[in-house]
Amino acid sequence: MGRVLTTEMAGSIIRRVREERSMSRAELARKAGIGARTLYALEVGESENFGLGNYLKLLEILGLSLSVDVDGHTEGIAASTTNTPELPVLELADIWKNPLGGKSHGSK
C-alpha cells in the first residue's frame, strides 16, 4: 500500500469513499458535525489544519480505519469498533486512478 503524504491525498480518500458510498458532502458533514464547506476544503486539499479527531470521525462514519507505520511496523489504529471483514481494502494506486486518462487527482 502507498503512503499518504499530503492533505490533498488524505482528503481525496474521503471524497472517493464518500462518493462510492453514494453519500452527499452535506450528509457526511452533518453526520460528522462539521460544515460542508470545511469538508469540501479537506477533500480538495485546501485544509491544512483539519484535525486528526475530525479526520478519524469521518473515517468512522465511512467505515474505514487508519494505520501508521512506526519504524517499519504497521500499527493499526481503529477509527471504528464496528469495522467488518467485508469492508474493502483500498489501495492508494486505485484511489488516484483517473478513468478519463491524463493527470490523476493528486497531480497538479
Image (tube, rainbow, N blue to C red):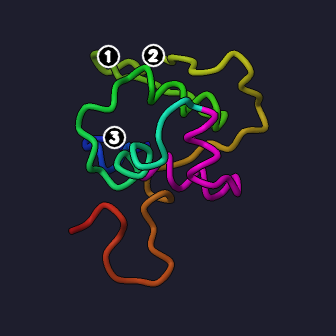
When the figure is inspected, residue 50 is found, relative to residue 99, above or below; the finding is above
Q: Is residue 15 visible?
A: yes
Q: Which amino acid does the dot numbered 1 rest on?
A: Val
Which quadrant, please, contains the N terminus? top left
The residue that disc 2 covers is: 75
Secondary structure beneath dot 1 equals strand
Determine the CA span between mark 3 and mark 1: 13 Å
- In reply to whether residue 13 is colored magenta, the answer given is yes
Image mark for residue 70: 1
Image mark for residue 3: 3
Secondary structure beneath dot 2 equals strand
Asked whether the beta carbons under mark 3 and mark 1 sit within 8 Å of each other, the answer is no
Q: Which amino acid does the dot numbered 2 rest on?
A: Glu
User: Residue 34 or 21: which is nearer the viewer?
Assistant: 34
- In reply to whether residue 85 is colored magenta, the answer given is no
N-term-proximal mark, 2 vs 1: 1
Q: Which residue appears at 60% of the width and 38% of the height? A: 30
Determine the CA span between mark 2 and mark 3: 14 Å
Q: Is residue 7 left or right of residue 16?
A: left
Query: Residue 91 at x, y = what percent?
Result: 51, 49
Query: Residue 45 at x, y = what percent?
Result: 29, 50
N-term-proximal mark, 2 vs 3: 3
Q: Which residue appears at 33% of the width and 41% of the height? A: 4
What segment carries the magenta color? Answer: 11-31
Other-residue count near label 3 (Cα within 10 Å), few / some / many at <14 / 14–19 / ≥20: few
